[in-house]
Amino acid sequence: MRRLKKNIRYFILAALALTVLSSRGLRNLVKNYLEYRRLERRQIELKLERIKLEENLKTVKNSAYIEQAARKELGLARTGELEYRFPPPKESDK
C-alpha cells in the first residue's frame, strides 16, 4: 500500500512535468508571460500619456491660453488694437 502511494505520487509528478515541459505547454507559458510583460509596459505608457493629456487639458481650459492661441493661430485682435505683421526675413537678409 505504501509503495502504491509512492508510485502514484511519482506518476502524478511525472504527468505534471510532462504537461508543463511539453513543447506546447512550455511554449504557451513563455508566450503568455512575454505578452503579460508587454501589456504591463503598454499600461505604463498609457498612464503617462493620460497624465500628459490631463495637464494639456488644464492648460487649454485656461482663458489666457485660449486668447494667446486665437491671436497666434487665427490672427485675432481685440477691439481697438492694431496688429503689425512683418514678412519673414529672406535668406539674403540673414
Image (cartoon, helix red, strand yellow):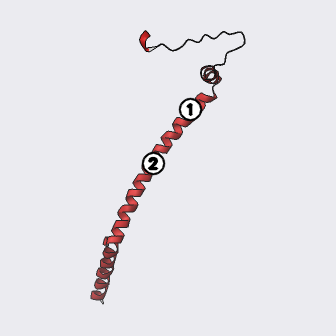
Looking at the rendered structure, the secondary structure element under dot 1 is: helix
Q: Earlier in the sequence, mark 2 or mark 1?
A: 2
- Residue 4: x percent and y percent? 30, 88
Which quadrant of the view contains residue 23? bottom left
- Residue at the (40%, 61%) spot, across then down: 32
Secondary-structure class at tag 2: helix
Residue bearing the label numbered 1: 56
Q: Quadrant of the C terminus?
A: top left
Where is residue 14 drawn, in percent x and y?
29, 78
Residue at the far front: name it: 92
Up-down: is 34 above or below 20?
above
- Left or right: residue 72 versus residue 11 is right
Residue 42's disc is 2
Amino acid at pointer 1: Asn
The answer for how far apart the CA atoms under marks 2 and 1 are is 21 Å
Tell me the quarter of the image containing the N terminus. bottom left
Instruction: Report whether 9 appears left or right of 32.
Output: left
Q: Farthest residue toward the left?
A: 3
